[in-house]
Image (cartoon, grey):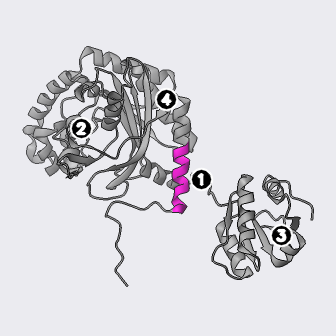
Amino acid sequence: MSEMIPAVRGMNDILPDHLRHWRRLESAAAEVLAAYGYREIRLPLVERTELFARSIGEHTDIVEKEMYSFTDRNGDRLTLRPEGTAGCVRAAAQNGLLRGHLLRLWYAGPMFRHERPQRGRYRQFHQVGVEAFGVAGPDIDAELILMGARLWRALGLEGLALEINSLGTPGSRRAYREALVAYLADRRAALDPDSQRRLERNPLRILDSKDPGTREVVAGAPRLWDFLDPESRAHFRELEALLDAAGLPYRVNPYLVRGLDYYTRTVFEWVTAELGAQGTVCAGGRFDGLVRQLGGPDTPAAGFALGMERLVELMALQGVTAPDDPPAVFLAAAGVDGGEALRLGEELRDAGVSCAANCGGGSFKAQMKRADRSGARLAVILGADELAAGEVSVKDLRGGGGQRRLPRRGLAARVAGWLAGEVPSP
């Protein structure tokens, strides 16, 4: 026997028993987003490498170390998408969707980063991304945040905390960067190796380091707020007022910076203490200059992405139930022509009754064991005796409704009624 070829490290199978939680998350997200007027867009998994280098930042960890990039047969440099915003901006601009009006979009699917796999961080991971184009004011920032809060309620999740901050404009951030580098350079020896490497290329990322020694150094660093331009301060204060008016609790985190260069002004995260180091389940902010940076018209924009693996794990930790989706009926057939069983199964499905038919033969006892394992509510049994009498037997596997012999003619309607609570007379 050949040796089994395992999955790629950090790229995990999502098994049927787990998918019910994913489906609940996906359906809840789609319903909440539709309630706010967001429309779905579907984006390619592969984009030109330049798109991410230009948007995320050439000196970010993502571009320098984590992207899955390759050269195709035409000599083009391509990358499996490490995040969704750049591709969404590219699609909106390329397809003429940015025409001076508010555009609300969302997408979902896998992203790819070559990181060290650990709990809550995988090389293939899944996100729901939400982007809004065309509004410069903080009201759209507040809408995105409130949308997240509504989704947590829809899922029944508790204990998620909102953190917010402002990064200001690129100009004010450059001035802060100079002050931060000057402060940290004098304390380089106390920084962890990753932070020492980031000091020259991406020093703002040092602010959210988890290393205890580095955090102690950062505690005395200059504050970004002191370098913000007046317009960014006013924007942030108005956002706070909007969240206060909505009664939504939050914490201002001066060290919240996000890891992508395109963010401006508002940044936010939803965090939990139940997932260890990977406690951020949703994050986003404004990216007002990105559309122009990628060749589109000058368009204000904001958005967020939520991590599906982390939210599914949090749902499991908090005991959030997700209904399984077994077939309503298991069709067992013994000693009869297979074509008759196929016809009966199709009749049930035509009536809107999901039906798993026994395949591969087997004794009546074996088929009933399969019926029980399937999770079906009813077993529809077609045997030689039933067929000769123009009937079938229907057994309630879950609800205590016993077993009935019912006419074969019009069976689908009777089964549908039974599933709806109308148990037929013997």
Q: Main secondary structure of the magenta part?
A: helix
Depicted 322 relative to depicted 92: above or below: below
Which residue matches tag 4? 248
State the CA–CA distance, disc 4 to disc 3. Answer: 56 Å
| Residue at screen point 51% across, 40% down | 29
Q: Residues within 10 Å of mark 3 (few under 14, many from 20)?
A: some
Q: Is residue 421 magenta?
A: no
Between disc 2 and disc 4, the foreground one is 2
Left or right of residue 151, residue 225 in this image: left
Q: Residue furthest left?
A: 186
In the foreground, 144 or 390: 390
Q: Amino acid at mark 4?
A: Leu
Between disc 1 and disc 3, the foreground one is 3
Q: Mark 2: which secondary structure?
A: helix
Q: Position of residue 122 (x, y in %)?
A: 34, 55
State the CA–CA distance, disc 1 to disc 3. Answer: 33 Å
Which residue matches tag 1? 321
Q: What mark, if any, has residue 393 been given in the picture?
A: 3
Q: Position of residue 199 (x, y in %)?
A: 12, 40
Task: State which quarter of the image contains the N terminus.
Answer: bottom left
State the CA–CA distance, disc 1 to disc 2. Answer: 40 Å
Q: Quadrant of residue 55?
A: top left
Between disc 4 and disc 3, the foreground one is 3
Q: What mark, if any, has residue 258 been given in the picture?
A: none
Q: Amino acid at mark 1?
A: Thr
Which residue matches tag 2? 51
Q: Position of residue 358 (x, y in %)?
A: 67, 72
> If you read the primary sequence from the N terminus, does the residue marked by circle 1 or circle 2 appear first?
2
> If you read the primary sequence from the N terminus, does the residue marked by circle 1 or circle 4 appear first?
4
Q: Label 4 near label 2: C-beta < 8 Å?
A: no
State the CA–CA distance, disc 2 to disc 3. Answer: 62 Å
Q: Amino acid at mark 2?
A: Leu
